[in-house]
Image (spheres, rainbow, N blue to C red):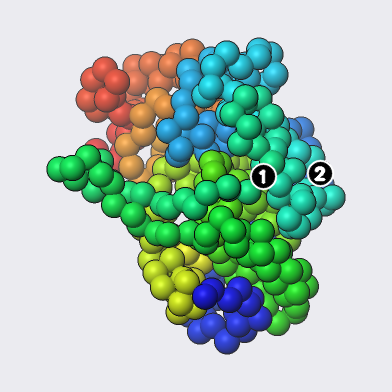
Amino acid sequence: MKEINYRKIEEMPITIEVMNMISALHEYKGRQELYIETQPEILERLMEVARIQSTEASNKIEGIYTSDARLKEIVQKKSEPRNRNEKEIAGYREVLGMIHDSYSYIQLKPNDILTLHKYLYSYSESGNGGHYKMVDNYIEEEDKFGEEDECGNKSVRFQPVPAILTAEYIESLCKQYEDVINNPNIAPLLVIPCVILDFLCIHPFGDGNGRMSRLLTLLLLYKAGYLVGKYISIEMVVEKSKETYYEVLQDSSINWHENTNDYMPFIRYTLGTIINAYKDFEDRFILLEKKKMTSPERVYSIIERSLVKLGKSDIMTLCPELSQKTIERALKKLTDDGKIAKVGAGKSTMYVDVKRL
């Protein structure tokens, strides 16, 4: 039977790689505070874009989609949800907003977790929100081609905690977190991935476990002072690397019930995800800070620094303050001026600095 005990993190062998990642995040955290104090207008613009991207990406991981136009309308509360997918998107928007605005008041306690889950399903008539699973669940997987076996079955990747023990395990998880989170000998950046992995292995709800895990990740990071998820979508970073995400989740959950699982793959992945978000944060901040740059200059600065070819959607993501039409005009001008080159055609068109050809 699994015993949740985060004091054992002190005994965990920590590699130089992980120590360097934690050190880098401490440095990013320090610079983040300077940005918050000196450039609130820029951060407000980043926050607006991040809320839309986070809501889209976290739901996309679970196969929940709507059009870009509808997504923006729902996140900005300019339209009511029209179908099941949009209701789940609206629910994520609500919880994300609560965490962004009130993270200091929300605690990792069973009642608060249940309340967040209730709001996640506040637009749904399913009755799923605000209570633990009533029947045992299991985590399925398809093969790498997304196919079922010849009998139409998917394989069981992991058997979570039985429904009857869910409340007990969540209570233990919360108590263990409280027991160590202020321990100076245990870095919060090691505790947080362990908590999230255990939450996913408990799989406490009938539905919404993945989305709740990403929302709780943001909550715990904010409470530890790592606020990058407010300005850059960590969920989008995860969505772009979701195959790796599922691989490390699999690796770290092996023998979880027997207390011999290895948390380190999931820890490394989580730390790497946060670092990538901070890198993106600083890149975007620098771009937005250069207010005197013309639109073509901003777009070119992104393409010039990129080591890979970029599509229009990539540039829109990296330059959220510019509209799609503005970016299209900038790309045309840069192409006409011979500063960038087009590679491919149609939806597959990519752009590259001519100096790299």
Where is residue 103? Give x, y as percent: 78, 48
Nearer the observer, 124 or 332: 124
Of helix, strand and loop, which one carries label 2? helix
Q: Residue furthest right?
A: 105
Nearer the observer, 172 or 328: 172
Q: Kindly identify the residue that appears in the image at 54 percent across and 44 percent down.
A: 206
Location of mark 2 (residue): 102
In the rendered structure, the answer to whether residue 179 lies left or right of residue 210 reads right
Label disc, if present, on residue 333 of the rendered structure: none
From what the image shows, is residue 126 above or below residue 329?
A: below
Inspect this view and state whether residue 247 appears: yes
How many residues crowd around disc 1 within 10 Å: few (fewer than 14), some, or many (20 or more)?
Answer: some
Label disc, if present, on residue 131 of the rendered structure: 1
From what the image shows, is residue 355 above or below residue 11?
A: above
Q: Kindly identify the residue that appears in the image at 66 percent across and 64 percent down.
A: 168
Q: Residue furthest left?
A: 150
Q: Which quadrant is the C terminus positioned in?
A: top left
For the residue marked with disc 1, what is the amino acid? His
